[in-house]
Image (spheres, helix red, strand yellow):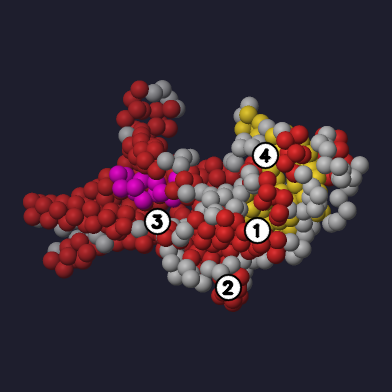
Amino acid sequence: MTISPTYAAVDDRAVKADAIRAPSPVAISAVEVSKHYGRATALERLTLDIRAGEVFGLMGPNGSGKTTFMRLLAGYLLPSGGRLQVAGHDVVSESLEVRRRIGYVPESAPLYRQMRVGEFLSFMARLRGVPERKVKAAVERIVERLALSAVVDKPTRALSRGYRQRAALAQALLHDPEILILDEPSNGLDPRQIIEMRQLIRSLAGQHTVLMSSHILSEVEKTCDRVAVLLDGRLLGVRALAESCDLEAWFLSLT
Amino acid sequence: MRELRILFGKELGATLTSPIGYTIAAVFLLVLGYTFSLTLFATKVANLQYIFHQMYVLSILLVPVLTMRSFAEERRSETLELLLTAPVREFSIVIAKYAATLALVLGIFALSLVYAVILGRYGEPDWGQIYSGYLALALHASLLVAFGLLMSSLTENQVVAAALSIGTFLMLWFADSVSYLLWPPFDSLAINLSLIGHFKPMVSGSVFISDIGYFVTASMLALFLTTWALAQR
């Protein structure tokens, strides 16, 4: 079964079939991935493929497992079961290889408060393996691309929410990763900043595979190529987003 | 090696820009200066044993204040997520924090060298005892920093981390007292766990491999456990 153009709810079997039949090269592959915290289940046997170059959205209410899935991909958490591959590398046995190929922005956009923006970006560039002779150029390039030049000498603790989010995104892009994982990238931004963030993410499509989560349906609709809905750690459906898509109706029918 | 250098630089920078290190250095110097003057004028003996014991006690109380931030603060501010999703090994993160904090503690200890210089200038101290005393302090600091990091890696609350560290150090300090209540071979185990039991001989000028082994092994065990704690996620 291919992705339904009628946007009807997709059952588990259909989701699995869609995941297996991803036509483009697969950037992220999850097969029966579970994550448990003691008796609590954060993710239950999630199977999903994300294609190279696409912008993929994860939707679901709080506690549905979006952040857990992203943390598993970023290597911050380890799966309790199943197989999870990023850029062809296993997140458990080849964790360092995976971390070299991803850029990750956590939901809270954490920054080192004692550092200035430029200093923070230089540190993160080095940490992410950018060669010493290229660090300065990489930082300058990303500062210009994300319009951070006005704050590059400011301490990160003095940044507004919008600049914090941009600085956090900048650290994830410094090493030009194959895959970007953005947890709620529009969180706390004002409408203008949301539009800028959306444009920025769209501009990354093609060169990078982008996985983002969001609570805002309209944002997902305008930004993503495909979207998945999670609820209580289970994948409810996956679908492509087209011009005539009624995402809201589809989301409500699933949840 | 490069990742270790980068992380060490970041940790040292954070340590030197924080007021905590300077405050602790000031408290150290104030208390040590007081003790040094008092004991020198009272005993007229040119040795630093009082100072070394004072530093032993002070470091048990003050090193946890330096280490409590290490992981607890990173966890609270969620920057630990940045570190652990970067292509660096957990062990490098632990070693960088350990080395930076130990460098600061040894730097603070080094300030007390001024007392050794004064003794050398105006008296005839036993230099062997002074050297072994500083060796004991360096090993003691290594153990405290390693265990402080371990406690910090277990919680995101800095006060809890400091309290756990101080509690652990006090238990180790008085471990030999429990030996009277235990049967063999646990009584000798308790004696051998004692912090002061391994510190005292070195401060008196007797350096035993077993004492050095105690501090080195305990430090390595704590660093290993810290790495393991970080990897459990």
Indicate the position of residue A107 as horizontal and vertical percent values.
57, 49
To which residue does mark 1 refer? A198
**Chain letter belonging to callout 1:** A
Residue range (magenta): B60-72
Q: Residue at x 63, y 29 (%)?
A: A40
User: Residue A90 colored magenta?
Assistant: no
Q: What is the three-letter code of the residue carrying label 4?
A: Gly
Q: What is the three-letter code of the residue carrying label 3?
A: Leu
Asked if disc 4 and disc 3 are in contact, CB closer than 8 Å, the reply is: no
Cα gap from disc 1 to disc 4, whole angstroms:
19 Å
Q: Is B124 rendered above or below residue A38?
A: below
Q: Is A239 rendered above or below residue B130?
A: above
**Chain letter belonging to callout 3:** B
Q: Residue at x 39, y 43 (%)?
A: B158
Indicate the position of residue B155 as horizontal and vertical percent values.
46, 40
**Chain letter belonging to callout 4:** A
In the drawing, what numbered circle is on residue B102? 3
In the drawing, what numbered circle is on residue A60? 4
Q: Residues within 10 Å of mark 4 (few under 14, many from 20)?
A: many
Q: Earlier in the sequence, mark 1 or mark 4?
A: 4
Q: Earlier in the sequence, mark 2 or mark 4?
A: 4
- Between disc 3 and disc 1, the foreground one is 1
Asked if disc 1 and disc 2 are in contact, CB closer than 8 Å, the reply is: no
To which residue does mark 2 refer? A144
Q: What is the three-letter code of the residue carrying label 1?
A: Arg
**Chain letter belonging to callout 2:** A
Asked if disc 3 and disc 2 are in contact, CB closer than 8 Å, the reply is: no
Q: Residues within 10 Å of mark 1 (few under 14, many from 20)?
A: some
- Between disc 4 and disc 3, the foreground one is 4
